[in-house]
Image (tube, rainbow, N blue to C red):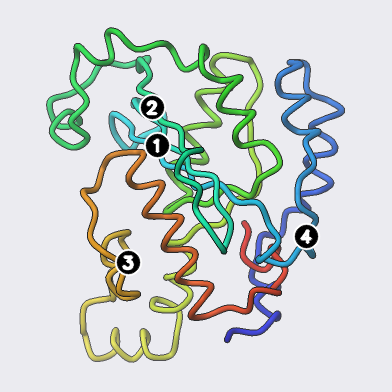
Amino acid sequence: MLSHRLGSRSSGLDWPAYLQRRAAEAREPMLRTFFAAGWPAPDTPLAETPLVALDLETTGLDVQRHAIVSIGLVPFSLQRIPLAERRYWIVRPSRPLSETSIAYHHITHSEVAAAPDLEAILPELLEALAGRIVVVHFRHIERPFLDEAVRARLGEGIRFPMIDTMSLEARLHRLSLWSRLRRWMRRPPVSIRLGDSRRRYGLPDYQGHHAMVDALATAELLQAQVARHYAPELPVSALWT
């Protein structure tokens, strides 16, 4: 088990102070309610932390040129995943679909034409996220795309603590002495993509690039990572960023 000293590698941002400040300063009532939710304290053990896995499918990878097209989330804990509470939305992107993005996530022009704008589902989405630590696989998609989408609709951005399962795999397989030795030997780096990461823990293959399925896959991956590498009593702040 990795020790509690992992806390030194967590985000330098004081999340409780940030959330409290945003709750006081946000102009939009919906965001004030979100930031004022009862978030887990930094010393909350992982086993007692309410979690929610989040995945976004987008029209591309550039937050300035692309937009969200679907959202999947799965509330969970280290002990269980209540699938009845899962949520999934297709939303109408502010930028047109490309043939490449359709081939990637299989969401079509007709589906997005009939879908609501993200603003219509924001109250439901924020309520589902509030007070839970959000778990993603590669936060550099979910964090900037959601922040930009909320900012475009409410005039204010949104940030909150996340656990990034890809970053946890990078700690183990890209930053270790063994990984440096592999680079010295000119061996390819260990893949930390979602499917490859899951296979290392004996988790089954799922069809990727569906926001609901990938959110579930991310929740299962974190459960497996904690079971193998971390103690359940480890403070959540040791893993959030």
Task: Classify 160 as above or below 154.
Answer: below
Q: CA distance from mark 2 to mark 3?
A: 25 Å
Q: CA distance from mark 2 to mark 4?
A: 30 Å
Mark 3, mark 4: which one is toward the viewer? 3
SS at mark 1 in the image: strand
Residue 51 x %, y %: 60, 51
Within 10 angstroms of label 2, few (less than 14), some, or many (20 or more) residues?
many
Q: Residue at x 34, y 25 (%)?
A: 69
Q: CA distance from mark 4 to mark 1?
A: 26 Å
Badge 4 amino acid: Pro
Question: Any mark on residue 42, and which?
Answer: 4
Contact, CB < 8 Å: mark 1 with mark 2?
yes
Badge 2 amino acid: Ile
**Which residue corresponds to mark 1?**
56
Residue 165 x %, y %: 46, 61
Q: CA distance from mark 1 to mark 3?
A: 19 Å
SS at mark 2 in the image: strand
